[in-house]
Amino acid sequence: MNLEDFGEFARQVHAALDALNQAREAALTQARQLTRASAYAIRAIHRGESDQADAFLEQARALAEQLQGLAQTYPQIFYAGYTQDALKEYAEATLTCAIIENRPLPTPEAMHLDYAIYLNGLAEVVGELRRRCLDILRQGYSAEAERLLGWMDEIYNLLVTLDYPDALTNNLRRQTDLVRGIVERTRGDLTLSLREERLQQALERLAQRLPETTDEPAPDTRL
């Protein structure tokens, strides 16, 4: 490139950076919208509003596809923190709703997510499952809470085996440590609830075997 060509090069630089900046602004907007739609889906599923949750997930899916499309054209956008965080929230919402509704989990390939984003989203799911378990246990011990704890165990059992550098897993190791504490506390809550349930059942069986009492006064046995 000689001096005569340098002016054309300058115009190309400005055009390329202008396009990248526009794509970045669009990605920021889509990331915020994706995070919001994912949060609304989780809130709806906890409220038992499955139709609302599905609607928000569909909205999130469309936003994620737009964001992923931009990332394919501009790889810098894909590796930006806001893009990674928004896609993680999308994974968390999708997987949380699938587990609570007892549906098969979509794979990373089906969601067009890399494994690091998917796994970090899966780690976040454990906290939402604990929240669901506590909501269930307020009504008493339930087999549904045991099913959710089973999922929590399986997620932790997977995460704890992923001993890879943080640069490859987006600091998944720290998330795994948090997941362990959440699972242990939830298991303790379920154990306590189960014991209370069994104690209540034992008291009810005992009450059924005891003779019925009446309000009649006892006979006077004095001479």
Image (cartoon, rainbow, N blue to C red):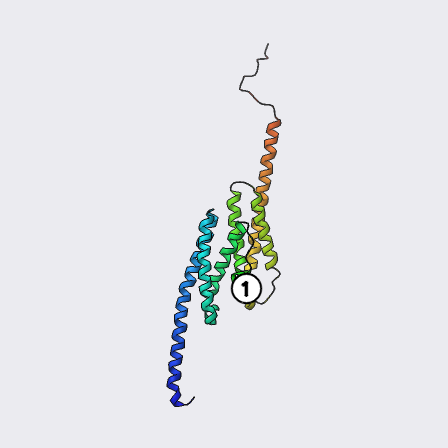
Where does residue 123 sit, x and y in percent of width and height?
Answer: 54, 57
Location of the N terminus (image quadrant): bottom left
Examine the rendered structure and indicate whether residue 16 appears above or below residue 140. Answer: below
Examine the rendered structure and indicate whether residue 211 appears above or below residue 81. Answer: above
**Closer-to-camera residue (51/210):** 51
Query: Residue at image x 53%, y 53%?
Result: 98
Q: Amino acid at mark 1?
A: Ala
**Closer-to-camera residue (126/187):** 126
Where does residue 164 sit, x and y in percent of width and height?
Answer: 60, 66
Query: Residue at image x 59%, y 28%?
Result: 207
Residue furthest to the top in view is 223
Query: Residue at image x 38%, y 70%?
Result: 22
Count the labels in the image: 1
Q: Which residue is mark 1?
A: 116
Q: Secondary structure at mark 1?
A: helix
Residue 26 horizontal side relative to residue 210, left or right = left
Query: Residue at image x 55%, y 65%?
Result: 169
**Closer-to-camera residue (161/92):** 92
User: Quick check: can you spot residue 29?
Assistant: yes
Where does residue 61 sit, x and y in percent of width and height?
Answer: 47, 59
Location of the C terminus (image quadrant): top right
Q: On the image, which quarter does residue 66 sit in?
A: bottom left
Q: On the image, which quarter does residue 82 sit in?
A: bottom left
Residue neighbourhood size for the residue with mark 1, other residues' Cα within 10 Å, grouped as few (<14), some (14–19), many (≥20): some
